Image (cartoon, grey):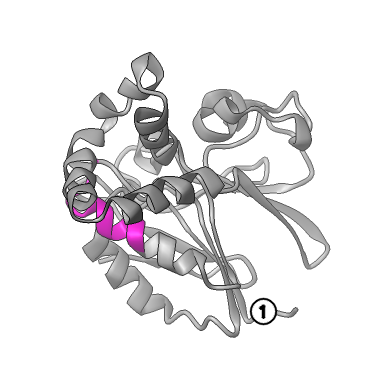
Amino acid sequence: MNYRRILVIGDMHGKFSRLLSLFHKIDFDEQKDFLILLGDYIDRGEENMRCFRWAMEMSEKPNVIALRGNHEQMMLYYYALGGTEGYIWLPNGGNKTKAEFEEWRKKDDTAFQRALEFINDRPYYHQMTINGEEYIFVHAGLNPKKKLEDQEEEDLLWIREKFYNGYRGDAHIICGHTPTPFLKRDWYYPIRLPNKITLMDTGSFMRDGKISCIDILSDQIWQSD
């Protein structure tokens, strides 16, 4: 199918008001547009569950792909595994999210369990050929030394410098995870690196941060208020 736009939205981190302002600007058409969400819908913001449930609802549309982020993975580990693997979630921004979800759980445990299933069903990446070029959409990045099919969960969700500095592949990689102001001070805008990497986490949870969206076909970028 020929889409009008192929849209990609970066990390949200519980900033639902910013998400709404961005989505209003995009004017998404579910019949004509394709949308990819790069994960990290929760943690560090004030309205984590609203962002999460929005992603759940959007993922039911045929032209929407909602990927798994490391923060969703930490939440899943917390409830499914507990122990050391699970408890890294709370000091990584999970306390507020946990409080919101526990309140929801008390009211509707079935819906809460569906939320965990939603996380467990999220793909780690999405691959497309666009105008003859290969694109890989992923939360954090890829291990430059491994083929796509051999990538490990930890790299797909957590990798940083080894990916940015070492990737030399032919595919364009569109990812989130590392806020752009961590790479360039006070820069709350997507960054394109020379090695075909586009970074879409523009510090949504920070005071001056934004949630950003790019159209792969036109290179147009929108940002939240």
* Secondary structure type for disc 1: loop
If the image is split into quadrants, where does the C terminus sit?
bottom left
Front-most of 220 and 147? 147
In screen coordinates, is 111 left or right of 164?
A: left
Mark 1 neighbour class, 10 Å CA radius: few under 14, some 14 to 19, many 20 or more:
few
Name the residue: 42% across, 67% down: 57
Please, which residue is most extreme toward the top here? 84
Q: How many marks?
A: 1
Can residue 47 be seen in this snapshot?
yes
| Picture layout, residue 33 above or below residue 214 | below
Quadrant of the rendered image containing residue 130: bottom right
Q: Which residue is mark 1?
A: 3
Rendered residue at 45%/63% (across/down): 213
Query: Please, is residue 151 above or below residue 136 in the view?
Result: above
In this image, 163 relative to 128: left or right?
left
Of residues 113 and 118, the one drawn nearer to the viewer in this rendering: 113
State the extent of the magenta-drawn residues as a range: 44-53
Please state if 130 lies on the left or on the right of 223 as rendered. Answer: right
Residue 26: image location, x then y, percent: 42, 76
> The residue under label 1 is which amino acid type?
Tyr
Position of residue 148 measured from the top left corner of the image (x, y, whole percent)? 75, 37
* Residue 196 picture location, percent across and down: 67, 46
Quarter-of-image position of residue 111: bottom left
Residue 46: say if magenta. Answer: yes
Question: What residue is at 34 percent from the left and 69 percent from the top?
Answer: 22
Q: Is 52 within the magenta?
A: yes
Quadrant holding the N terminus: bottom right
The secondary structure making up most of the magenta span is: helix
Name of the residue lying farthest toward the right: 132
Give the residue displayed 16% in from the left and 41% down from the top: 99
